[in-house]
Image (spheres, grey):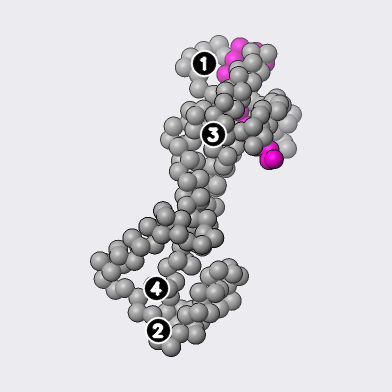
Amino acid sequence: MSHHVIITKVWAVDKEEAEGIVAGEMEDSIQERLFDYFDHADPIEEKDLQSYGVKTFKEFDIKQFEDRRIQIRDRTAQIKDGLKTLLAPYFLTKDEAALCITTEDGEFKKCVEKTLKRKHDVKPPNTFDEMADVISKVVTAIAKKDTGSSMLMFYMEQIKKLQYCIDDPQPYNTLQCTENYYAEIPCDNKRGLKAFYFACDRHY
């Protein structure tokens, strides 16, 4: 069983009301069955901000949004690594393989070694149509999950979910993505209300 701690921003009149709102949202998120149960919510106060590497709540908000983009960037890098292995049989020449022999990527290293042992060098596609054909085959293999131990489809799904959190930050997106660690509970009228922050712990 794993913990999923998510920072939640709630607008309310006072701390007591905010605790009620966040507890309700967390319980509702459990009903989607992605998580097993909601454990607790710890309030985040100004004195706690230093432990998050910021001094103000404004910086705190910016950091949470930036963390999403970092997650997308990291997943994109993982997709690139996976694609290198799938594209190697079509594009990796002996000359380029020789330059990659020191790679630390185990799967890609196998492709490099296999390329260097070939009798004949690969002839990379050199027309737009040929490249489109290769890429179509690779994308189809990913969609069919016919790529061995590849996690490419998973990474793409996580990027899609994170992008939903950015484009449409509603609870059904922000609270249901295990890659997301920040959610602002929507509030139509914030007049007279104050922002409260909680670190909410769920299990899945």
Q: CA distance from mark 1 to mark 4?
A: 55 Å
Q: Nearer the viewer, mark 3 or mark 1?
A: 3
Residue at point 34%, 66% (across, down): 134
Give the residues drawn in magenta, as a range: 1-15
- Disc 4 marks which residue? 91
Q: Quadrant of residue 194?
A: top right
Q: CA distance from mark 2 to mark 1?
A: 65 Å
Label whose residue precedes the other's in the sequence (3 or 1): 3
Of 191 and 31, the residue lying toward us: 31
Label whose residue precedes the other's in the sequence (3 or 4): 4
Quarter placement of the C terminus: top right
Classify mark 1: residues with Cα within 10 Å, few (<14), some (14-19) or many (20+).
few
Q: Is there a contact, CB below 8 Å, between mark 3 and mark 1?
A: no
Kind of residue indicated by mark 2 = Asp
Kind of residue indicated by mark 4 = Phe
- Disc 2 marks which residue? 121
Residue at point 39%, 72% (across, down): 90
